[in-house]
């Protein structure tokens, strides 16, 4: 019995050693940015594709050259015909969110109080699908795009401590939001839709509060 126990302990130690991640063999790809970055998101459709943004006011799209993401391609000659770099905001890009229903679309928010939706296939950076200037009374720190179950919505959170919900198909008038939440007392720091129950939105703020909002609940 002791022999088998010793053998089991030996196997456990061996398995633990095998399962340990050797970071020396992990592939690392580093990208040099011109300024501090805040915004990151992965594509919901195209494997290995992600976007970044920061205080250089630009959005950059990173497209892998193969399925192993051994390297990333730049420039406009890529397999998706995406623009891979463009100016998105005037005073820094705060957040980026890919569409959950269209592989070519993403939304951005910035310190210029704007929320913009882009089609990456368009070559002219001025040809935005839609935008809301002065969407908040402060920097738009975060956005979150609700999954396509039911009505699509984009949530936005700002330094003005307000959360707003928008219809991505009708984003032009700052007064045309679907809902407004004036609960928090300090800037909104993060937003996240529940992927299982997509009508629930989580909100965090500098007022040290986390709140959950269920938009499937209708008043009697």
Image: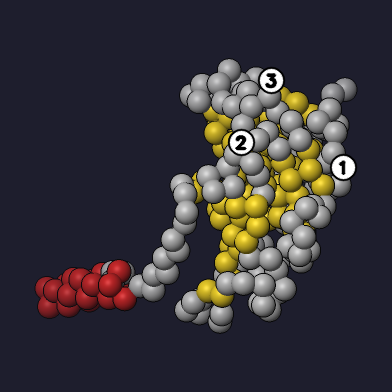
Q: Is residue 112 above or below residue 138?
A: below
What is the C-alpha distance between the residues marked 3 and 1? Answer: 22 Å
Give the foreground label among 1 and 2: 2
Mark linked to residue 47:
none
- Residue 57 versus residue 167: which sits nearer the camera? 57
Tell me, yes or no, if residue 193 can be seen here.
no
- Residue 140 versus residue 162: which sits nearer the camera? 140
Residue situated furthest bottom in the rendering: 66
Tell me, yes or no, if residue 161 can be seen here.
yes
Seen at 47% across and 49% down, the residue is: 35
Seen at 22% across and 75% down, the residue is: 14
User: In which quadrant of the rendered image does the C terminus lie?
Assistant: top right
Which of the marked residues, 3 or 1, is nearer the chain's N terminus? 1
Dot 2 falls on a residue whose secondary structure is: loop
Dot 1 falls on a residue whose secondary structure is: loop
**Residue at numbered disc 1:** 170
Count neighbours of disc 3 (C-alpha within 10 A) and say few if under 14, some if 14 to 19, many if 20 or more: few
Mark linked to residue 182:
3
Residue 112, percent from left and from top: 65, 35
Residue 28, percent from left and from top: 39, 70
Q: Is residue 23 left or right of residue 100?
A: left
Count neighbours of disc 2 (C-alpha within 10 A) and say few if under 14, some if 14 to 19, many if 20 or more: many
**Residue at numbered disc 2:** 111
Quadrant of res 25: bottom left
Q: Is residue 14 above or below residue 210?
A: below
């Amino acid at each position: 019995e002791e022999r088998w126990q010793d053998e089991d302990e030996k196997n456990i130690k061996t398995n633990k050693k095998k399962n340990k991640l050797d970071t020396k063999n992990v592939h690392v790809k580093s990208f040099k940015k011109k300024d501090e970055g805040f915004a990151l998101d992965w594509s919901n459709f195209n494997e290995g594709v992600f976007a970044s943004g920061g205080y250089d006011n630009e959005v950059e799209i990173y497209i892998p050259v193969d399925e192993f993401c051994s390297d990333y391609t730049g420039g406009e000659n890529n397999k998706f015909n995406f623009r891979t770099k463009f100016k998105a905001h005037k005073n820094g890009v705060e957040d980026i969110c890919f569409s959950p229903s269209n592989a070519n679309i993403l939304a951005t928010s910035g310190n210029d109080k704007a929320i913009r939706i882009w089609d990456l296939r368009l070559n002219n950076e001025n040809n935005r699908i839609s935008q809301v200037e002065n969407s908040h009374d402060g920097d738009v720190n975060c956005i979150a795009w609700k999954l396509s179950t039911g009505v699509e919505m984009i949530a936005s959170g700002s330094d003005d401590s307000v959360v707003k919900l928008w219809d991505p198909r009708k984003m032009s008038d700052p007064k045309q939001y679907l809902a407004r939440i004036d609960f928090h007392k300090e800037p909104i720091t993060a937003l996240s839709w529940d992927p299982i129950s997509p009508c629930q939105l989580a909100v965090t703020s500098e007022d040290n509060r986390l709140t959950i909002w269920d938009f499937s609940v209708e008043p009697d």
